[in-house]
Amino acid sequence: MLERTFERALFACRWLLAPFYAALAIGLFVLLVKLLQELAHFILHALDSNESQTILGVLTLVDLSFTASLLIIVMFSGYENFVSKFDHSDHKDWPEWMGTIDFTGLKLKLMSSIVAISAIQLLKAFMDIKANSDRELGWLVGLHMVFVISGLLMALTDRVAAGHHDK
């Protein structure tokens, strides 16, 4: 009796994660505001921008888009994995990937998104190389390599663990 009550209470605690996912939705809205701000700046300066500035503007939009997509993946997959399943029977445009990403897949998607965002930041720094010191560029390359190696090690670890469970 006591054990069952404790287990039910513990299981109900998963709902404490719901406000975290709601906060991510607010973060998505803030990113939308930033996107609109960057888009307005990009359009207003389109005619007097050089090629490098135009590419940097586009990379900023891509970066914001990747970050927003990352938030969606974390919100939906995290909610489905840890809180509750969505009832998508009445949604005809329900994405196929939703409901199929487990915790391992979520970790790998998260890491690959971080690597992609880091790569865009690095590319932006190299596109405007005169504005960055060698030290700043070194740190950006070093951090990017840490993300890449971490992602590879995480994928390798998950692969080894999956192979171990198959036997």
Image (spheres, rainbow, N blue to C red):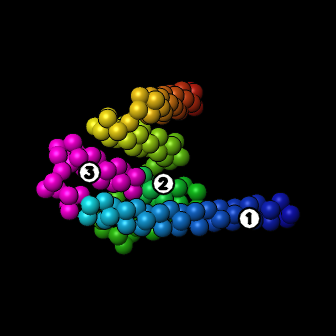
Single out the mark in the foreground, 1 or 2: 2
Q: Nearer the viewer, residue 141 or 65?
A: 141
Element class at badge 3? helix
Q: Which residues are magenta?
A: 42-69
Q: Earlier in the sequence, mark 1 or mark 2?
A: 1
Q: Is residue 164 left or right of residue 139?
A: right
Residue identifier under label 2 = 74
Element class at badge 1? helix
Q: CA distance from mark 1 to mark 2?
A: 26 Å
Query: Mark on residue 8?
Result: 1
Residue 144: x and y in percent read 44, 33
Mark 3 crowd level (few <14, some 14–19, many ≥20, 10 Å Cα):
many
Residue 157 higher or lower than 2, as above or below? above
Single out the mark in the foreground, 1 or 3: 3
Residue 29: x and y in percent read 42, 67
Q: Please say whether residue 110 is one of the residues in the magenta stretch.
A: no
Q: Nearer the viewer, residue 154 or 144?
A: 144
Q: Is residue 33 left or right of residue 145?
A: left
Q: Nearer the viewer, residue 85 or 39?
A: 39
Residue 126: x and y in percent read 32, 34
Residue 96: x and y in percent read 35, 55
Is residue 115 visible in the rendered image? The answer is: yes
Residue identifier under label 3 = 57
Q: CA distance from mark 3 to mark 2?
A: 26 Å
Q: Earlier in the sequence, mark 3 or mark 2?
A: 3
- At x 31% / y 59%, what residue is drawn? 38
Q: Quadrant of residue 65?
A: bottom left
Magenta-drawn stretch, dominant element (helix, strand or loop) = helix
- At x 85% / y 65%, what residue is drawn? 1
